[in-house]
Image (cartoon, rainbow, N blue to C red):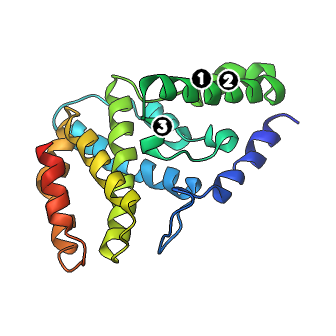
Amino acid sequence: MGIHAYFQSLTDLERIIRCPGKFKFQEHSVAEHSWKVVQYAKTLADIEESHGIAVDWKKLYEITSSHDYGEIFIGDIKTPVKHYSLELRSMLQQVEEGMVAHFIDEHIPEAFKPIFRKQLREGKDDSVEGQILEVADKMDQIYEAFAELQKGNSEQEFIVMYRHALIKIKGIRLHCVDYFLQHILPDLVSEGARSPIDIERITREALAA
């Protein structure tokens, strides 16, 4: 079927709902998440460049826009489950990467296979772009969880998601992380002050962890 099979498969990302099995005031699909991650990453990269850090924009767009493509095959697995152990995380990543590789082998024309293998790879690494992807991905978890907590959703899943993502972000050494913690997060917490859930306390505890 060629590249048509890839284009057609993208619709599946619209049908995969994040954080399945939990009550949510607003559903979010993997496709929506991927789009938002690209938007966060653009601004984060601009902040890095304002501090003199070189950013490979082509790589950044490739890895941010495609970072969850493999969920077409395995669905959205909750972050606490994914990271329950290094062994489990490694096994899930192997399955996901194996199925993406099989899809490329089966459907993508030979001339484009190296390009697709590069674009659909796991993008989170120690490079500036890989770290920006990690921050952007976790930022969207924070915003998704915050939106639920702000509305009074007491599902423990969203407290865990918010806390885990914030702890992960604060451990990444980038200028954009400093900016997020100093200028963006306080606005977010202030906006959530009227929530019946104490978002400020959850945030303080996560930052102190």
* Callouts 2 and 1 close, C-beta under 8 Å: yes
Which corner quadrant holds the N terminus?
top right
Q: In the image, which is nearer the foreground, mark 3 or mark 1?
A: 3
Task: Check disc 2 and report the residue beneath it.
Answer: 98
Q: Nearer the viewer, residue 207 or 70?
A: 207
Question: Mark 1: which amino acid?
Answer: Gln
Q: Quadrant of residue 102?
A: top right
Q: Is residue 114 above or below residue 100?
A: above
Place of residue 169 in the rendered image (x, y in percent of width and height, measured from the top left): 26, 41
Classify 10 Å Cα crowding around label 3: few (below 14), some (14-19), many (20 and above).
Answer: some
Q: Is residue 176 above or below residue 40?
A: above
Question: Mark 2: which amino acid?
Answer: Gly
Residues at marks 3 and 2, CA–CA distance in whole angstroms: 17 Å
x 76%, y 30%: residue: 103
In the picture as drawn, the residue positioned furthest to the right comes out as 1
Place of residue 35 in the rendered image (x, y in percent of width and height, measured from the top left): 50, 54
x 63%, y 23%: residue: 117
Task: Check disc 1 and report the residue beneath it.
Answer: 94
